Amino acid sequence: DGGITQSPKYLFRKEGQNVTLSCEQNLNHDAMYWYRQDPGQGLRLIYYSQIVNDFQKGDIAEGYSVSREKKESFPLTVTSAQKNPTAFYLCASAAEVYGYTFGSGTRLTVV
Amino acid sequence: QQQVKQSPQSLIVQKGGISIINCAYENTAFDYFPWYQQFPGKGPALLIAIRPDVSEKKEGRFTISFNKSAKQFSLHIMDSQPGDSATYFCAASAQGGSEKLVFGKGTKLTVNP
């Protein structure tokens, strides 16, 4: 089955801790995206990558980092510099003909 | 100029009725307008998309109407069903379906039985 997998489904972060959210796709899509979803805010773009070994900041990149070493993988690290990280994080991959395919999301909570 | 404005924020419709959600944009470079459906705790799923060369696209009970001169597009759900209860997002991008999308803030649709 082709698709996009996010893990873990739930993640808890302590103050001052870095955490990494996983995103893997087997759709052979070049483009991958990370969005943050907060109630009433829609989806806001954190980072995106159009090709391996290249990525660009989105609208709310501060406090986050990414890497794109493989076409299939686009992990997101939420650093301690992100002061309000509690949110639902969505990863997507995209191809011209098919548009975006989203993963099932990771819900991150600060404890 | 990068915003997509979506309304209403919430919508309650009776079973069998028509649900209408509207979006407006400013950036004339946008050329791809998808709609996504999201159920609680899940990622959004592509519902239907349109490009500016057509004014309407229909897939089953779902129709996108597009008005290029007014820079508006809307989603119509005919014969709305309780299973359609979800949050709907409009979006737009320039240069195609794999480019970065700008999303509206979403409409929570409730269809009462």
Image (cartoon, rainbow, N blue to C red):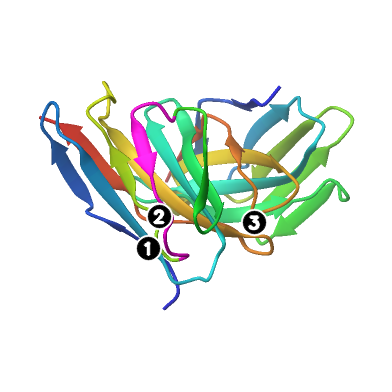
Amino acid type assigned to the residue bearing label 3 in the image? Arg
The residue at which mark 1 appears reads as A24
| Mark-to-mark CA distance, 1 and 3 | 33 Å
Task: Quadrant for the N terminus of chain A, please.
Answer: bottom left
Residue A90 location, x and y as percent?
A: 39, 46
Q: Earlier in the sequence, mark 1 or mark 2?
A: 1
Q: Position of residue A47 (x, y in %)?
A: 47, 40
Give the overall secondary structure of the magenta segment: loop
Magenta residue check for B15: no
Chain letter for mark 3, please. Answer: B
User: Which residue is at a point 28% across and 36% down the rendered structure image?
Assistant: A78
Does residue A21 appear left or right of residue B29 in this picture? Answer: left
- Residue B14 appears in view: no
Residue type, mark 1 in image: Glu
> Within 10 angstroms of label 2, few (less than 14), some, or many (20 or more) residues?
many
Instruction: Give neighbour class at mark 1: few <14, some 14-19, many 20+ (Cα, 10 Å).
Output: many
Q: Tell me the subunit letter for badge 1.
A: A
Tell me residue B80's x, y (percent). 55, 48
**Which residue bears the numbered disc 2?**
A74
The residue labelled by disc 3 is B61
Range of magenta residues: A61-71
